[in-house]
Image (tube, rainbow, N blue to C red):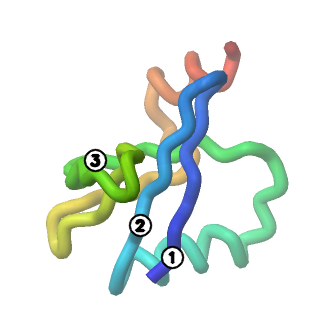
């Protein structure tokens, strides 16, 4: 298990990842990327833990994209 924090301005949410998704995060971290990445989380489960809202992956359904080459990510990075 690995927990990553996703943040945008004043909003912060934690995301618990399990299984193959841990490997995806570790591969990205090992790539040596040093800037703030754009992380797209697709098909995740919202959960509540200790009064806080967070996300967790759904096995074989969630997709994690790091710095995707899509127009929304490019525009978001310009902010």
Residue contact between numbered discs 2 and 3, judged by CB atoms under 8 Å: no
Q: Quadrant of the N terminus?
A: bottom left
| Quadrant of the frame with the C terminus | top right
- In this rendered view, identify the residue nearer to me: 30 or 51: 51
Q: Residue drawn at (66%, 46%), measured in percent from left and top? A: 37
Which residue was labeled with disc 2?
16
Which residue lies at the image location 69% right of the left edge and 17% below the top edge? 78
In the rendering, which numbered label is found on residue 70?
Answer: none
Instruction: Establish if 36 lies above or below 73.
Output: below
| Residue annotated with mark 1 | 2
- Residues at badges 1 and 2 in contact (C-beta under 8 Å)? yes
Q: In this rendered view, identify the residue nearer to me: 76 or 1.
A: 1
Alpha carbon distance from label 2 to label 3:
14 Å
Residues at marks 1 and 2, CA–CA distance in whole angstroms: 6 Å
**Residue most extreme to the front:** 50
Q: How many marks?
A: 3
10 to 40, vertically: above or below: above
Depth order, front residue of 69/55: 55
For mark 3, what is the residue? 42
Chain-order first, disc 1 or disc 2: 1
Q: Earlier in the sequence, mark 3 or mark 1?
A: 1
């Amino acid at each position: 298990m690995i927990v990553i924090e996703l943040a945008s301005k004043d909003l912060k949410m934690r995301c618990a990842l399990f299984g193959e998704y841990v490997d995806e995060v570790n591969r990205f971290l090992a790539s040596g990327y040093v800037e703030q990445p754009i992380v797209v989380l697709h098909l995740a489960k919202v959960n509540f833990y200790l009064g806080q809202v967070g996300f967790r992956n759904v096995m074989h359904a969630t997709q994690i994209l790091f710095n995707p080459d899509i127009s929304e990510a490019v525009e978001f990075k310009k902010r």
